[in-house]
Image (cartoon, rainbow, N blue to C red):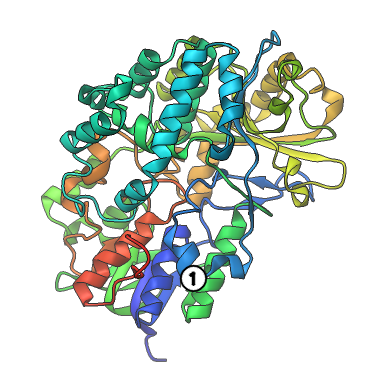
Amino acid sequence: MATPTYDAIVIGAGHNGLCLAAYLQRSGLRTLIVERRHEEGGGANTEEPVLAGYRHNMHAQYMEFFDVMPMIQDFGLEDLGLRTVMPEAQAGITFADGRPPVVLHRPDLLEATYTSIARYSKADAELYVELKQRAMKLEELLAVGLYNPPGAVPNAGSPEGVAMMLEGVFGDLGVAGHFVAKSPKMVIDELFETPELRALLYRTCVEWGFPIDSTGTGGAFFTFIMWTMANWKLAIGGTHTLAKAMTQACYREGVDLLENSQVERIIVEDGRAVGVVARGTEYRAERAVASNADLRQTLLDLVGADHLSPLWVKRAKAYRYGPSHVLGTPMFCLYEAPAYRSAKWDPDIDRCFYTMVGFDGPDDTARYIRDAYSGTLPKPAAGTWVNSLWDRSQAPPDRHAATGWYFLPCASELTAAEWEDVRRTYNERFLATWREFAPNMTADNVIAHKLYTPDQMERKNLMREGDFSNGEFAPDQMGPNRPFPEASNYRTEVEGLYLCGPSAYPGGGVHAACGYNAFKAIAEDLGLPSPIPADRSY
């Protein structure tokens, strides 16, 4: 039998791999995707792991990039079944003593956000609303930065460029260029006086990628965090519907997709990637191979050190996974949605897309984050969501599916027996805390529950250490340094081999920018047409 031959092969059908494959096929390259699992989407997956009829998003939850994601527009994903809803109350923090919650609403409802924050501080309310309005005006500029390789826009991502932008956009609010050198926590503490608001902002920073104590990332608070915060959509039917729509787009373009096929190695001949071996079968690629797998797996396991320079071997071995983006996903099947003590001040907290539970203020929020990052199992607390409040397909009639994120230590910090003990006990400990905040969260209200831990994420989705970004977010692994400077443009030193997964810029998150930007790099190398339509700047 003849060896199957394609123009391009993409390793992994995560959403970045699907994105890249669709553009490659549309550009005229016959493309194959090879996926180790039985379904596509990677971290964009929704399952029923507790009870039938109760759907839980296992990884990705908040869709903050849908308004700017090129593939949604270019391939008509809404015509292929992608549906969304945008809850009015977006992010909130509630309290066991029943004091007023802080609730951040979507961008068209900033008056409600102002009212919520102003219960504590009118000055903080005015500043937050002003920062949010200005950050939203930066959307196209931020999208251009996201959907281009780092360095494509001169000086845009440099500390000097960010400092100039901060002073130009926010300078009259007391924001100076040196804020770039601060950590997000330093910025939040300097700007806002309300402890309750600071606690909420700490948690939202780390939920979307920026450790609160990481110096040199303060500028990201004003740009990326303020732009994306409370600007989230819910995928109707679960986030896997995005993966399904992207898969259908690939099929419609003519992409071949091979499931249940672990890639064993990338074939390198005379310094060039020419194909892959999967399940013992060789598949040839005449023009390009791209990997959605993580950096170490791609370079050290699939290519092999024999085909790399000593520098690239050293860089790959030095690449770090976690502790940022290491999560546990608790899942609860409920009779009733939580009813919070704080709702007496503002009922919106009971219909909030994302709710912090188990935190009293900024100090214990910071301690929780630092414990997880240092390898210590934190005192149970969580960011929670009840998607069935807006999407009835995610739970049976008159029932609710609640999910959340715990920040937990890296997978290697605990033994297999210790992780098993966490799965057996941690949810119950959190439920005891949850009842202090929402009295109806009794044992009688919980039909069943389950916890998905970092070690399981590592085995199931090859998210090393349970890190869904497949690489720590720190200044030396972000921007033009991701995954390391010599590999920051999606190309590798192996001719014809490209990176298209979250180990590449800009990292984790459901934005498909890694796949889109990898296509731009391949298109430049192979003389393919640009994916940018006339009416879009990126």
- Which residue carries the number 1 mark? 75
Q: Judge whether 185 appears above or below 522 on screen.
A: above
Q: Nearer the viewer, residue 274 or 244?
A: 244
Position of residue 42 measured from the top left corner of the image (x, y, whole percent): 51, 55
Position of residue 173 measured from the top left corner of the image (x, y, whole percent): 33, 21
**Amino acid under disc 1:** Phe
The furthest residue to the bottom: 1
The furthest residue to the left: 310
Quarter occupied by residue 217: top left
Quarter of the image that includes the N terminus: bottom left
Q: Residue at x 60, y 45 (%)?
A: 58
Q: Nearer the viewer, residue 303 or 158?
A: 158
Q: Residue at x 44, y 35 (%)?
A: 133
Q: Judge whether 261 appears above or below 353 on screen.
A: below
Q: Judge whether 429 appears above or below 217 on screen.
A: above
Q: Nearer the viewer, residue 176 or 311?
A: 176
Position of residue 21 measured from the top left corner of the image (x, y, whole percent): 41, 70
